[in-house]
Structures are given as structure tokens and as C-alpha cells.
Amino acid sequence: MKQSAVPRTRVPKRPGPAKATIADAAVVGFPARRLALVILAAFVIELYLYSSALNAPFVFDDFGLPYEGGMSRTLSTWLAGVRPLLMFTYWLNDRTSGQSPLGYHLVNLIIHAISTGLVFLVLSRLLALTGRLSARTVSVASMIGAAVFLIHPLQTESVSYIAGRSESLAGMLVLLAYVVFLYRRREAISWVEAVVVVALFGLGVSTKENAVSLAGVLILTDVFWPRPFSLSGLRANWRLYAAMVPGVFVAIWKVFQILSAAPTAGLTLHNVTWYQYGFTEARAIFTYLRLAVLPFGQSIDHDYPVSHTILEHGAIFYLAALVTLIAVCIRWRNRYPLTCFGLLLTLILLVPTSSIVPISDPLAERRMYLPLVGLILIGCEMASHIRISRNTGYAACGAMLMLFGALCYQRNQLWAQPSRLWAEAALESTGKSRPYANLVDQLVQERRCSVAVPYLQHAEALLPHDYDIEVGWGRILECMGRRDEALEKLLRGAQIRPNSDVYRLIGLLYGEMGRQTEAGAALHKAVDLDQRSALAHDALAAWYEWTHDAAAAEREYRASLVFAPSDRVASTGLNRLGKLPPSN
């Protein structure tokens, strides 16, 4: 007999926690008081961790900025470049601090403290959007994540390095725009909020070009929350993207203009092609990830070799790993939303510097200033899946923060002593001479020239017949009073790479040796090789002064002022000659 079928009642699955929407921010409210407390606490902690570097002198690219060159105090002169907002902050420092680095460092600390508060808000919002964490857990995790952002040793290059302000200030503006976007009053952004985001976007790009990545961050957020990969967020926020499209095109056009003319970046870079740079950056991304998790082997000037082929330095394996990670993120976007979103966020923020547009330095720690936020999100989700007691978890987080804080403090002690900072970079460099050249420059300023000798001997064994090493030897030997040997090294450098700088050094050395005829010939050649070099014109003017040719000296000083309107050497020389430069 056939058994009759018994209908089965379908038991519904237990509903999971509901995911929050952006509109919930209006219900929760904006935590203004908590934000102020986080920023204040961040600044106090910074004052201790960065105390060693507060009076650190200008280093590296700092010397190429307007305040160091004695630029005119006229504001319009400062704002004439490609990064007007950044230069405005330097102008304010110049007006209040002059040549004292303390004021510049304090402004960098203030920017970093504000960014830390904004990171707290971003983390709070994104963690809440998962709908998987309690309000208390979100608050605690956001505090810990913001603390990691504040004290991570990778951040020191963007904070202790005065020229690193371009990264931290642009990052602060991007974070501010993102906070406006995340904490909007309704699910669909209003026209006013859209205009504010676009305005902050423009300010960010006018500070540093990599702020253009904000457009990708906003699109990723709308696509990912509350349900990956939905287009509802993009449709709801059409006002923002309509307002942003012209700005994005202008930003891309501006970046393209800069890259087409920049000697250190762009597709016109001679020593690396776009695909070679892409191979190299596939490796660099994993180096950044390692430095974030295990911050050892830091350097102010990384010697990072280029992968000229897809096989060199194992680039193919890093490319495969990168593609695999992205594929896994797409596949597991619902199971591990914070991890997948965090990794994609990190990659988007790295795109301007780590894609296929060549930059002379393939790896720079300051580029991780904002991408670190994405990795912090990954850490938050990983921690949520570890089954340990609450006290054990707090102890582990405390130990991590203590370690990062100790490394940050130690790193700032190096920033306070530039010669040690460059010595560390030089010893780690096997194929790059620039760290040795900067070490020489620093030791000459400190009049500790003999300290450079073992470093240059080491460099000479690694990099024989290198221009920077030969010129470095020349400067050190001259500083030590060994002028004949110094001249031999400088002349050898001029054979390797004849340029205005080396002939200027040769001319000055001839002058010290009393060989004024040879000095004049070398200085004339320095000017001929670079008519726009204020340094060369100043040196030749000084030679004319020595030969009592006041008219020729005045001509050279005035030529220097044409290319460097606030050149103090030229102004002083003209005053000494009894002449004043024409007033503007």
C-alpha cells in the first residue's frame, strides 16, 4: 500500500541582524562632543609620541619648498603653484614662525589629530552599517581603530616630515568630505550636502593630486552598503555624481597636466615604462601591507627595485595574488563585508600612486596615510571572528597599541636627528645613491664630515663610478680640508654627468684654492649649462666681486633674481654693492 505524502511545514531561517542604512545616521545623531574629545586626546598623545621631532630641522624635499628658499612674503606668489591650499598653510607658517621648524611641526600635528577624529567617525559609521555589531562594540572598535591610525609608525613620514603635509592635509580633506557623505541626513544626499562634498573634493585635489581617489571611494561605498553589489545607492545619490562629474574631469585634466610636465612622474619618465611600473607596484602593494602589519624596515628613501619584466623579482606571482584577493573579495562580499570593503578601499586609495602611471620613487611610506583606514577595517572584522574573552581581547589590543606607540616614538627620535635618518636609509640602499648624497649634505651642514667617510667607502664598493658618490666624496674631502683630492673627485663627477651643480662646486673649490682663473672658467660653464640656476649666477657674481668687476657682479645678481625673485644671497650681494633690486 502506498504511503500518503505528509505535507511538511517549512521552518523559516532565523533572521540575522538587520543592516543599517546611511539614513540611520540622522537618527543616531552626529557625535560632536565625542569627536572633540577624540581630537583633543589625539593631540595630547601626539605631543608625547612626536615630542622628539617637534624641533627637527628641515630635511630632504623641505629644502625645495618656498619658505626655505626665502620666497617673497606676498601671498599671491605662494599660491601661484599647483597646490595653492597646501602653500597657503606654509605661508601662514612662514608669517608666524619664519625659519623655525617648530610651528610647521605643530600644524602637522593638528592636522593629524583632526584626521584621527574623522577616522573615528568613518569607522563608527562603517562598522554600524554591517548591522552585526552592538553599539558598544562599534564605539570601542572605532576608538581602537582611530588610535591605530594616530600612532602607527607608518604615519610618521606624513607628520614628522614637513613636506609630508601634502599627504596628511589632503587626507584630512578627503576624510572630511567622506564624513559629510556618510553622515548625511537622508538616504539620498541633498544638493547642499553634494556641493559641500564636491567643494571639499576640490580643496583636496588642490592640496595633493591623489585626493582624486575620493570619487572611487564614494562609488565603492554606494555600491557596497547596505547590500553588495547594489546600484540603489548610486541611483539615490545622483545629485552628488552629477555635481561631481565636472570636478572629476577637471581634476583628471589637472593631474594629466602636472604629470606631463613633472620630471619625477608621468608617462614621460625615461627610466621606467608604464607596464614596468605596474609590475613593480603589484609588489609594492604587498610591501605596504607588510609594513602596516609588521612595521619594520622603514626608510625615508626606500631603495625599491623596478621589475622590468613580469618575471623579475617575482612580479607575476604578486600580480596573481592581487587578482586572487580582489576575486575573493567579490566572491565573499556578503560573508566578510568589512574585510572585502576594507581591501578594496585600500586599493582605490593607492591607485593614484600604485597603478601604471610611473613615479620616480616606486615606494614611499607617506602614501599609506589614508589607505591604512581600509586595513584597520579588515583588522576590526578579523578581531570580531576571534573567540576569546573580552579581557583577553582588550589585553591584546593594548599590547598592539603599546608596540605601535613605542615604534612611533622611536621613529620620531630618528626624525629629530636627520643624519641618523639618512645613515639608516643609506645602509639599506644597495642600488640607489640618493640616500648617500643626502647623508653627505646633512653631515656637511653639521660639520661632521669625517663621519661620512665609511658610508662613502661602502657606497663606492656597491656603486662604482656613480655621480652622486663622486660628488659626495668631493664635498666631504673639501670639508675636511683635503682640497686636491676633493677636486679630483668633483672632476670625475663632471665627467660622469656634466651639469651646472658640479661645475659650480668645482668653481667654488678653485676659488678656495686661490686658482681664480680656473674658478671663473668653471663658474661660467655652470651658468652656461643652466641659465636658470640662481645658485650658479650667485656663485659667478661672487667671483666677479672678488675680481672687482662690480658691474658684472650686479648683472649676475640681478639675473639670479629673475629666476628666484626672493633669493637672499642675490639681495644681500646687491646691498653690499650699494645697489638695491628694483621694487615690485
Image (cartoon, rainbow, N blue to C red):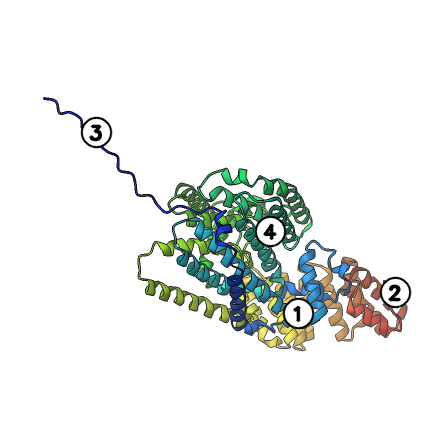
Q: Which quadrant is the N terminus positioned in?
A: top left
Q: Position of residue 485 (x, y in %)?
A: 66, 72
Task: Give the Cα separation between the discs numbered 2 and 3.
Answer: 101 Å
Task: Give the Cα separation between the discs numbered 3 and 1.
Answer: 95 Å
Q: Amino acid at mark 2?
A: Pro
Mark 1 is surrounded, within 10 Å at the Cα level, by few (under 14), some (14 to 19) or many (20 or more) other residues, namely many
Q: Quadrant of residue 443?
A: bottom right
Mark 3 is surrounded, within 10 Å at the Cα level, by few (under 14), some (14 to 19) or many (20 or more) other residues, namely few
Mark 4 is surrounded, within 10 Å at the Cα level, by few (under 14), some (14 to 19) or many (20 or more) other residues, namely many
Q: Amino acid at mark 3?
A: Pro
Question: Residue 206 vs residue 74: left or right?
Answer: left
Q: Describe the element under mark 2 as helix, strand or loop.
A: loop
Q: What residue is shown with label 1?
A: 474
Q: Describe the element under mark 1 as helix, strand or loop.
A: helix
Q: Nearer the viewer, mark 2 or mark 3?
A: 3
Q: Nearer the viewer, mark 4 or mark 2?
A: 4
Q: Nearer the viewer, mark 3 or mark 1?
A: 3
Q: Amino acid at mark 4?
A: Ala
Residue 211 — which label? 4
Q: What residue is shown with label 3?
A: 7
Q: Nearer the viewer, mark 4 or mark 3?
A: 3
Q: Position of residue 271 (x, y in %)?
A: 60, 50
Q: Nearer the viewer, residue 437 or 491?
A: 437
Mark 2 is surrounded, within 10 Å at the Cα level, by few (under 14), some (14 to 19) or many (20 or more) other residues, namely few
Residue 232 against residue 87 in the figure, above or below:
above
Q: Describe the element under mark 3 as helix, strand or loop.
A: loop
Among the two numbered marks 4 and 2 on one chain, the one whose residue lies closer to the N terminus:
4
Dot 2 and dot 3 residues touching (CB under 8 Å): no
Query: Measuring 55% from the left and 56% from the top, which residue is drawn there?
Result: 367
Q: Amino acid at mark 1?
A: Gly
Among the two numbered marks 1 and 2 on one chain, the one whose residue lies closer to the N terminus:
1
